[in-house]
Image (cartoon, rainbow, N blue to C red):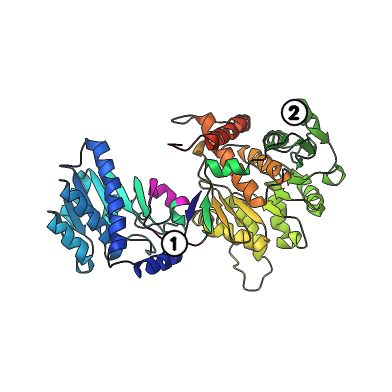
Amino acid sequence: MRHAHRVEVVRAAEAALMARLPEGTLMQRAAVGLAATCARLLTRRRGRVYGGRVVVLAGSGDNGGDALYAGAALARRGARVSAVLLAPSRAHAAGLAALRAAGGRVVLEQEVGLADFSRADLVLDGIVGIGGKGGLRPEAQPYARAGRAGVVVAVDVPSGVDADTGEVAGAALRADVTVCFGTYKPGLLIDPGASYAGAVQLVGIGLELPEAEVAALQHADVAGLLPVPGAESDKYRRGVVGVAAGSARYPGAALLAVAGALRGGAGAVRYVGTAAEEVVRRFPEALVTEGGPAGAGRVQAWVVGPGGGEGAERALAEALAADVPVLVDADGLTELARLGPGALAGRTAPTLLTPHTGEAARLLAGAADGKDGADARPPAADELAAARLGTARRLAAAYRATVLLKGSTTVVADPGGAVRVNPTGTSWLATAGSGDVLAGLAGSLLAAGRSPLDAASVAAYLHGLAARHVAGAPGAPVTALEVAAALSAAWNDVRSAAAEPEPGA
């Protein structure tokens, strides 16, 4: 699992470690790891480090110092290193001295710096560190706009990206590789910041850190959360998921939600709604009825809302009245936004909400409706997308429910404060019906006994992995039913990878 810590937590851990180490040790550890990564990139690009053109963009403070020390290490191996000082009077003195001693060149003129930047084989972005807020300052902005020939390596975080949130408030430098120290930062895992970070590599520097609030699952983590039937299992012991979806206008939503639910680990799928005939024709193993959730029989979890149309109001009310976990999606979310968080008050079983940013805007407006001092302007979807971590957390707190916020980075937030960021997926998933498949899959995992946090994050992981299977490389259009059909392959990939022995074992 990739664990990401806030800047405040990292700073405290760094201070505690530096108090026990000789001065400069921590920076040297970071610079050694950074230089090693740069050397590998240069060797891959040109066959060797010697003679490679390297530009260090050095701001003030320790981030610039890390970059300067790494530049010095590369210069000692024969690279031609130029350091562009964006704050000459506040450049890291010891790092600058080390670079000069190794034969590095210092550039103060912006025109020369931009010319070097554009021709370099490798650029080290040490302009702003993890404490930076807002976009790049005017003196650094030309480097974000300039063309470049080489690889850009960000030091800890791309300059202009908020390390805690991934928000990008203005101009930012886009990296091909980000080398982060001690721990991942949330902003490297969450868009839009993640799209600026490129490939993220972690360099350990010996920090002792508390449990992280933000994490990203990997194959082994997902494999450990998958429900696997035992020898004595039957369909009821494995769990029954109820699906209330589809309408005369959107009958396909029922089929897609059931398709996802059948591949989520529950023993049976119980469908209710107007598309019962179509569902049983396509999926004869489904248990169907044309009534609502109240008369469907016993289930361990409900999925309500995909393509529900006018029937979503009744379906939501009946599902929420049941003492089982409920996943609310699509038209169910629209109805919940109209009712506000009060509709979930008094529920003892957990609730999982799966909005995209447009639905998140409506839910937040519904949560603010009637409150004294509430913002009269509803939040805009693009604003919420630019602040994905904060949006998911706001929703989870307002509705006291787990939230799976869909988008370029899917973020799962628990009302207790835990957050998981999904690392799988493809832009081809932005297709009609893919959310219905995801809802059914996550609901099935709920019925199989997984917590809302685990069900949501595992479902997002498998869903994204299945889409990659279908899209292939470099990528091609996919359909929602194709994604549903590929879920079993994704499931097997995860379990197979987790079962492989460690190298050298």
Between 251 and 447, the residue placed more toward the observer is 447
Question: Is 50 inside the magenta-drawn segment?
Answer: no
Answer few, some or many: residues within 10 Å of disc 2's Cα (few below 14, many 20 plus, some between 14 and 19): some
Residue 208: give its label: 1
253 horizontally vs 21: left or right: right
* Mark 1 element type: loop
Residue 7: give its label: none
Going 18% across and 61% down the picture, which residue do you hit? 96
Question: Is 200 inside the magenta-drawn segment?
Answer: yes
Q: Position of residue 363 (x, y in %)?
A: 65, 57
Between 114 and 27, the residue placed more toward the observer is 27
- From this view, report whether residue 227 is shown above or below residue 318: above
Which amino acid type corresponds to the residue marked 1 in the rendered image? Glu
Picture quadrant where residue 479 is located: top right
Q: Is residue 166 visible?
A: no
Which amino acid type corresponds to the residue marked 2 in the rendered image? Phe
* Mark 2 element type: loop
Going 42% across and 68% down the picture, which residue do you hit? 12
Read off the residue under disc 2.
283
Q: Residue furthest front?
A: 505
Q: Nearer the viewer, mark 2 or mark 1?
A: 1
Instruction: State the extent of the magenta-drawn residues as a range.
Output: 189-210
